Amino acid sequence: MKAENNSSEDEAGFIALLEQKSRDQRRLAETEIIPGWAKGVGDWLVVHPWRVLVPMAGIGYLAMRVIWGIEFRELILGLFGGFAR
């Protein structure tokens, strides 16, 4: 029983330490010379990276398809085991 109490105290202390470090990091980020919009975008990207990566991948694919044409489609399909000519 005593060992269980000791481990939960250690765990609670560890969580408190992590929370303190998190507050310190937030305070440091707020004092740095970063525009307000960049902080907001950074916080948003941490939570929703797919909202940027998926459209960028689509735009990149379309750009490469315009440049290389049907050969690019065949390359992508070949990489992922799609249809062959």
Image: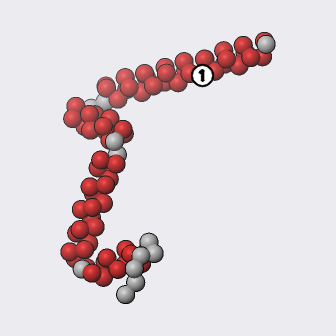
Q: Looking at the figure, which quarter contains the N terminus? A: top right
Which quadrant of the figure has residue 14?
A: top right
- When the figure is inspected, residue 82 is found, relative to residue 27, above or below; the finding is below
Percent position of residue 35, x then y: 22, 34
Q: Position of residue 9 (x, y in %)?
A: 66, 15
Residue 15 lies in quadrant = top right
Displayed quadrant of residue 67: bottom left
Q: Is residue 30 left or right of residue 6?
A: left
Q: Quadrant of the C terminus?
A: bottom left
Is residue 34 at all visible to an observer of this figure? no
Neighbour class for label 1 at 10 Å: few (<14), some, many (≥20)? few
Q: Is residue 85 left or right of residue 2?
A: left
Residue at the far front in the pictured view:
83
Q: How is the image coloured?
A: secondary structure
**Residue 74 percent location from the top left of the image:** 35, 80
User: Of helix, strand and loop, which one carries label 1?
Assistant: helix
78 to 8, vertically: above or below? below
Residue positioned 35% across, 29% down in the render? 29
Residue nearer the viewer, 18 or 47: 47
Give the residue displayed 78% in from the left and 12% down from the top: 2
Q: Is residue 51 visible?
A: yes
- Identity of the residue drawn at 44% across and 72% down: 80
> Which one is in front, 17 or 57?
57
Query: Which residue is located at x 25 percent, y 74 percent?
Result: 65
Which residue was labeled with disc 1? 14
Q: Amino acid at mark 1?
A: Phe
